[in-house]
Amino acid sequence: MSAVALLREQLAAILDVAPAGEGPLATGVRALDAALRGGIPRGRVTELVATPGGGAATLVRRLAETTVARDEGLWIAVIDATRTLAPRDWASICLRPGVWVIRPADPARAAWCADVLLRSGAFALVVLDGAPPASRAVAVRLERLAREHDTALVIVRDAGQAAGALPSTLRMRVGAAGRQDRVAVQVDRGAPPRRVELPRTIQAPRRLGRHPEPPDRRGAERTTRAAGRRR
């Protein structure tokens, strides 16, 4: 069975599951939740603009942990478009029911994955991490789906990456604080400007390399041996 068919089959089994609960999703950081009037808004788009190694993975994991710990049994999905989130950092969360981590083979398919997950109506939180900027048509569709299904759609992009066409209701910048064990979050849009720091819970390496597996060098070794014998 193809990956697409398997995803559709799994979603079909939970289409009757609606994201329970009301109100924003708490981030688990009291000062940040106070600045955001309760947390990440549902039915809206939130953008995290992160510097490399700045701690965005820490904030996303804290949000995921807090969401699945709620009594309503909320479901969440994290789309790791670049396949760079370290599995060991997410192992404890993925063991809980209702937590999906999607790693598309092609980063360009990440927006399509978000579309499928949002259309299912089963998730309270969908995180799109590291996807290429979406076209305006795709962006408008994702925003509409998030609004229709009352899902918090969180877009994580690097500070050096061009902004996509997806209009965000809330935007925060995430980067390293003065100390290596702290993460700084600056609210830029959608709430009163405020800077909040939180402990870094994911220590280096926080992300894997762009290639999730080391290259297979066996072919190169055989070529080198053959060349040696010809000499």
Image (cartoon, rainbow, N blue to C red):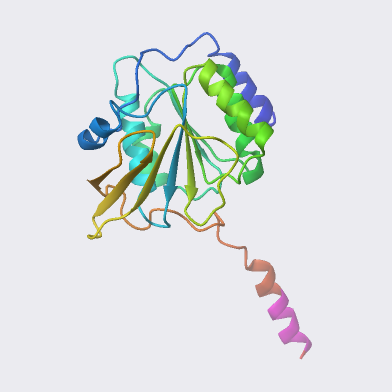
* Residue 103, percent from left and from top: 56, 40
* Residue 80, percent from left and from top: 52, 42
Q: In the figure, residue 112 lies in which quadrant?
A: top right
The foreground one among 57 and 88 is 57
Bounds of the magenta segment: 223-230
Q: Main secondary structure of the magenta part?
A: helix
171 up-or-down from 214: above or below? above
- The reply, left or right, for residue 182 in relation to residue 218 is left
Q: Give the total number of marks visible in the rendering.
A: 0
Which residue appears farthest toward the bottom when viewing the image? 231
One can see residue 86 in this view: no
The foreground one among 101 and 123 is 123
148 up-or-down from 27: above or below? above
One can see residue 198 in this view: yes
* Residue 51, percent from left and from top: 41, 55
Position of the C terminus by quadrant = bottom right
Q: Residue at x 47, y 26 (%)?
A: 44
Q: Residue at x 65, y 74 (%)?
A: 221
Question: Is residue 36 one of those drawn in magenta?
Answer: no
